[in-house]
Image: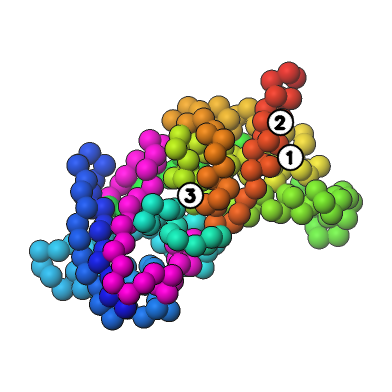
Amino acid sequence: MNFKLHIWRQPNAKAKGHFETYSVANISPDCSFLEMLDILNAQLSTNPVSHPVCFDNDCREGICGMCGLYINGRPHGNDDGITTCQLHMRRFRDGDEIWIEPWRAKAFPIIKDLVVDRSAFDTIIQAGGYISATPGAAPDARNTLVDKHSADLAMDAAQCIGCGACVAACKNASAMLFVAAKVSHLALLPQGQPEAKQRVKAMVFAMDSLGFGSCSNTYACEAECPKQIKRDNIARLNRQWEAAKMS
């Protein structure tokens, strides 16, 4: 398969970025999107005047959340419930033109090319702090019973990998789905209750101070989340926030 790639190039955060066009040929349809970029970079490395394209990646198993790319107008590309590393070239047609950009958000400044600084998410998590409940040994887990429905909802929320697709998809660059998932997976469990009110206040204040926008209520975040985190968590976050304000 052959493709024409329009890739955002930007040498640093202060420089003006632009698209550059590249061609790749004989790409296997079973090749992942990141492997295709690896092939392109191998070609660019042989040219003394070209520089390889910088992009984030780590596990390449859909776990780490590092590989956030905006592909043809969609975070992570034209498939549902996947990260960029799980997108395969068979999802495109031979000869397609592909536009590749970094996440676009004030809170995610560009470092270089397709790499953005997502440390704002780390700051929000740090603001939430730790739980005071001690885990104990394995048998101690039975001492605090959790009903299956709550456990399932908590596990669903805990699947969030912090990739930032929700921010990239939102026209207001809101981090509400991310924060809601991080608040929910503890708020649903008894071990998370002692610090629940302090946690939600601290995380929402951190989110607002870092420059994320307000929820747009379009649910683009849920549609583009690779782990399919539900917008119900945003409703739970709002309830937790209101309860914390009244305490």
In magenta segment, residue 24: no
**Which residue, given by chain and number where applicable, does mark 1 sit on?**
187
Q: Is residue 166 left or right of residue 43?
A: right
**Which residue, given by chain and number where applicable, does mark 2 sit on?**
240
The amino acid pointed to by label 2 is Gln
Q: Residues within 10 Å of mark 3 (few under 14, many from 20)?
A: many
In what element is the residue under mark 2? helix
Q: How crowded is mark 2: few (under 14 residues within 10 Å), some or many (20 or more)?
A: many
Q: Do the residues labelled 3 and 1 touch (CB within 8 Å)?
A: no
Separation of marks 2 and 3 at Cα, in angstroms: 24 Å
> Can you see residue 126?
no
Separation of marks 2 and 1 at Cα, in angstroms: 8 Å
In what element is the residue under mark 3? helix
Residue 69: numbered disc: none
* Residue 128 x %, y %: 61, 36
The amino acid pointed to by label 1 is Ala
Of marks 2 and 1, which one's residue comes earlier in the chain?
A: 1
* Residue 210 x %, y %: 45, 31
The amino acid pointed to by label 3 is Ala
> Can you see residue 95?
yes
**Which residue, given by chain and number where applicable, does mark 3 sit on?**
165
Q: Where is 128 relative to 61, above or below?
A: above
Q: Nearer the viewer, residue 104 or 129?
A: 104
* Quadrant (top left, top right, bottom left, bottom right) of the N terminus: bottom left
Separation of marks 3 and 1 at Cα, in angstroms: 23 Å
Give the extent of the magenta segment. 83-112
Q: Do the residues labelled 2 and 1 touch (CB within 8 Å)?
A: yes
Q: How many labels does the image show?
A: 3
Q: Nearer the viewer, residue 138 or 111?
A: 111
Of marks 2 and 3, which one's residue comes earlier in the chain?
A: 3
In magenta segment, residue 98: yes
In this view, the mark in front (3 or 1): 3
